[in-house]
Image (cartoon, rainbow, N blue to C red):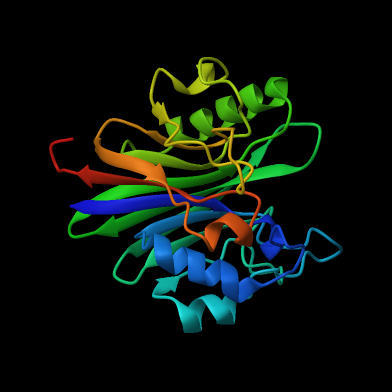
Amino acid sequence: MKLRLASYNVHKCVGLDRRRKPHRIIDVINEVDADIVALQEVDLRLGSRPAALPLPLVEHETGYHVPDFAPESPSLGWHGQAILLRQGIEVTEIRRILLPGLEPRGALMAELACDGLRFRIIGAHLGLLRRYRLMQMAAIRAAVSARAVMPTAILGDFNEWSSRYGMTPLTDDFRVHAPGRSFPAARPIGRLDRIGLSEGWHLKQAGVHASTLARIASDHLPVWADVTLSLDG
């Protein structure tokens, strides 16, 4: 089975022109044309955390469905994050992972099935300080270890500037790929957005989506990875 995985920090749908345009974010997501997209900063983080990217817009303007990680909240997701799934990908279970740190953080876990294969996607937005990022990655790894063994991909904004350090809690079980420079969007220098793959995934190619629209729609560019998943791992 072939899949395109993507991660996109949408910056509350505020572009580099300082205008909030959810439709513009939707257009970029459709340009990337991934099967699974992990989004960060999809809500306003104020009060009840109203959605910056409204669910009806996603449902009407894309081919994705969105697991409801926070039915008690008006946000599209939980802790500012959401996972978009192409129609035909079945959700078998979802979990929320509380992450330690100076500020409230959380990760999303979705166990999925498609074409007879089962796999897991985790969406994450890690903290600004490496000390807490290491703790958060350890918490994600512990949450994965407590579940059934299956191919797992971690998609998100890792907030790590170094290309050599900062991934230690994951390196025993994941190969963490930085597809390219994704921040800041207009003139990117940082490889903050990454994709971690466990055994069972096979990376074919990866990159940064740097269209004219993407360079203004958010302060991050989307990253993507084309992968295959096989029964024999």
Q: How many marks?
A: 0
Q: Is residue 40 above or below residue 42?
A: above
Quarter-of-image position of residue 171: top left
Question: Where is residue 141 drawn, in percent x and y?
Answer: 50, 29
Q: Is residue 95 left or right of residue 129?
A: left
Depth order, front residue of 125/14:
14
x 67%, y 37%: residue:
99
* Quadrant occupied by the C terminus: top left
Question: Where is residue 113 drawn, in percent x and y?
Answer: 29, 57
Q: Is residue 106 left or right of residue 116?
A: right
Quarter-of-image position of residue 85: bottom left
Q: Is residue 29 above or below residue 136?
A: below
Q: Is residue 222 visible?
A: yes
Q: Is residue 2 above or below residue 142?
A: below
Q: Is residue 37 left or right of residue 156?
A: left
Depth order, front residue of 128/220:
220
In the image as oriented, which residue stretches furthest toward the right? 47
